[in-house]
Amino acid sequence: MLVIKDLHKSYDTGKSKLHVLKGINLNIGEGEFVSIMGSSGSGKSTLLNIIGILDEKDSGIYELDGIAIEHLSEIRAAEYRSKFLGFIFQSFNLIGYKNALENVALPLYYQDVPRKERNKRAMDYLEKVGLADWATHMPNELSGGQKQRVAIARALITDPKVILADEPTGALDSKTTYDIMKLLQEINNNGKTIIVVTHEPDVAAETKRNVVLRDGIIESDTFITQRVLA
């Protein structure tokens, strides 16, 4: 599903180059539920951005579903993101002037899906995350947990190969974090590959594999006994 070999990434700070990723090797198979952890500056956000085709590597290999990801134009990169990836963010990234249904349906708009069909599919996904009754509510009428459920439905609606979640519970209280991680476990149990970047050990414990970065390298990569949420 996802193959990374000897991946390097540096940034020009003006006076020198900051070597952020220093030879990352990582394979993630279909249906895995992986957490990527590390302190600030460890490289985890840079790695997620490269996996999400939001940034480019300097060298090495990155393959997604058997396709080499390199030297992409902005148009092709956007096409690959739309085809392969679904994104969940800490800040939800909902559009404030669109209701829950319209936010979920938005990725299908960019795929030229007719309005009636995209609204039907959006409602189906809102039902899956338990928010069908909130379809016409605006983001400012939703709680943090409800906003994240809308964001999860939006990430799923294009049936992506991989869900990338960047600190998906970082803005939520402990009870809502529990509910969101339970939902992600259910989604993973239905076969979806999920990669979560988190600094919270409790969140990582609810995945099936922990990858820990330190100073741009993988310090540990461990399959764990997942704490299943009832």
Image (spheres, rainbow, N blue to C red):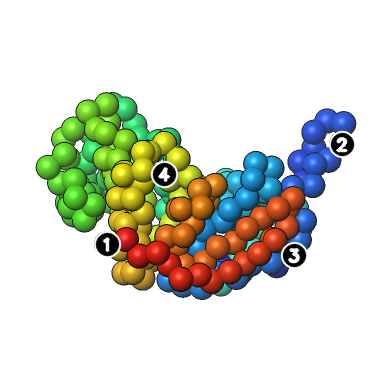
Note whether 42 is above or below 68 in the view shown. above
Of helix, strand and loop, which one carries label 2?
loop
- Point 80% across, 37% down: residue: 12
Residue 83 appears left or right of 209: left
Q: Residues within 10 Å of mark 4 (few under 14, many from 20)?
A: many
Q: Residues within 10 Å of mark 3 (few under 14, many from 20)?
A: some
Q: Label 3 amino acid?
A: Asp
Residue 147 appears left or right of 204: left
The residue singled out by tag 1 in the image is 230
Q: Label 1 amino acid?
A: Ala
Query: Residue 16 bears which disc, if any?
Result: 2
Indicate which label's residue lies in the foreground, 1 or 2. 1
Q: Label 4 amino acid?
A: Thr
**Sequence order check: which comes first, mark 2 or mark 3?**
3
**Sequence order check: which comes first, mark 1 or mark 4?**
4
Indicate which label's residue lies in the foreground, 4 or 2. 4
**Do the CB atoms of the residues marked 4 and 2 lie less than 8 Å apart?**
no
Query: Residue 179 bears which disc, if any?
Result: none
Note whether 195 is above or below 152 in the view shown. below
The residue singled out by tag 4 in the image is 169
**Sequence order check: which comes first, mark 4 or mark 2?**
2
**Sequence order check: which comes first, mark 1 or mark 2?**
2
Where residue 146 sits in the image (x, y, percent)?
A: 26, 40
Q: Residue furthest right?
A: 15
> Distance from label 1 to label 2 (Cα)?
50 Å
The residue singled out by tag 3 in the image is 6
Q: Label 2 amino acid?
A: Ser
Indicate which label's residue lies in the foreground, 3 or 4. 4
Of helix, strand and loop, which one carries label 3?
strand
**Sequence order check: which comes first, mark 3 or mark 4?**
3
Q: Which of 24/100 is in front?
A: 24
> Distance from label 4 to label 2 (Cα)?
35 Å
